[in-house]
Structures are given as structure tokens and as C-alpha cells.
Amino acid sequence: MEPKLVPLRIPTGWSVALNKFREVNPEQFKHEDYEFCWEFDEDILHLKNEYRNRILDLGWYPSFNPKGIYRLLLIELHDDHDEQTESWEKPLIIFESRDIEETQRTIEHILIQVTEGLL
């Protein structure tokens, strides 16, 4: 059975491009043969706020590695492709944790801050 998605309160204005953020405890991921190791990928969650020109991106780095960590990035969107690439190299926020609940709270906090124009 597939694990449930982590519940997230997503404010108005955000679109969900990808959500594979599942209730899988990283502390149980000790070996690469772990039943849910595929849940620990670089592409877990991707949210976009067109009005505020922001992307919130969550991944596990390095992918499928038991010693990895959740990495959350807040990226500023640009119309120019070259500037867009630079934005990924210089995110507005970088948050890292192995704690799924702390990551969940941080996601929700950043979403609210962006929605209110504070980030």
C-alpha cells in the first residue's frame, strides 16, 4: 500500500505542479533496500505562485540515499531564461531537515509568507 500524502494547507494563489510528499519516516530509511526508498527523490513537491513570481520546491538530496536530507528552496521566477537559471543557483530561501513534520511546518509557513507578500 502506498503511503498517504503529507497534509498541507496551501493558500489561494498556489498551483501544485507535483506532490509526492508522503508520510514516510526518514529515520526508517536506513538501507537502500527500504520498502519506500523511492519516496526519497529529488522531485517531491513543486508549487508555483504566478502572482508573486515564486516557486517552492522540495526534494531529497542525494536521491534515494539513506543519509540524505529534505531540501526546500524558494525560487524567484523571471521571464528571462538566463535569469531563471540564476534564480535556481541563488534561491531566496534554503531549508534542510530530516524531520518530516518540521519540513511540513516550514512549507506551510513559507507559503503563507509569500501569499502575504512578505517573501
Image (cartoon, rainbow, N blue to C red):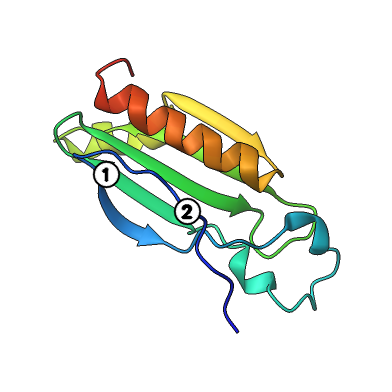
- Residue drawn at (50%, 63%) of the image: 5
Report whether 39 appears left or right of 67. Answer: left
Q: Secondary structure at mark 1?
A: strand
Q: In the rendered image, which quarter is residue 37 located in? A: bottom right
* Residue bearing mark 2: 7
Looking at the picture, tell me which residue is in the foreground, 112 or 86: 112
* Residue bearing mark 1: 48
In contact (CB < 8 Å): disc 1 and disc 2: no
The residue most toward the top is 118
Looking at the picture, tell me which residue is in the foreground, 82 or 6: 6
Residue 76 percent coordinates (x, y):
30, 29
Q: In the rendered image, which quarter is residue 2 located in? A: bottom right
Report whether 29 appears left or right of 12. Answer: right
Residue kind at label 1, given as amino acid type: Lys
Residue 12 percent coordinates (x, y):
21, 40
- Residue drawn at (66%, 63%) of the image: 24
Residue 82 percent coordinates (x, y):
25, 36
Say whether residue 67 is visible: yes
Residue count near mark 2 (Cα–Cα under 10 Å), binned few <14, some 14–19, many ≥20: few
Residue count near mark 1 (Cα–Cα under 10 Å), binned few <14, some 14–19, many ≥20: many
Q: CA distance from mark 1 to mark 2?
A: 17 Å
Q: Secondary structure at mark 2?
A: loop
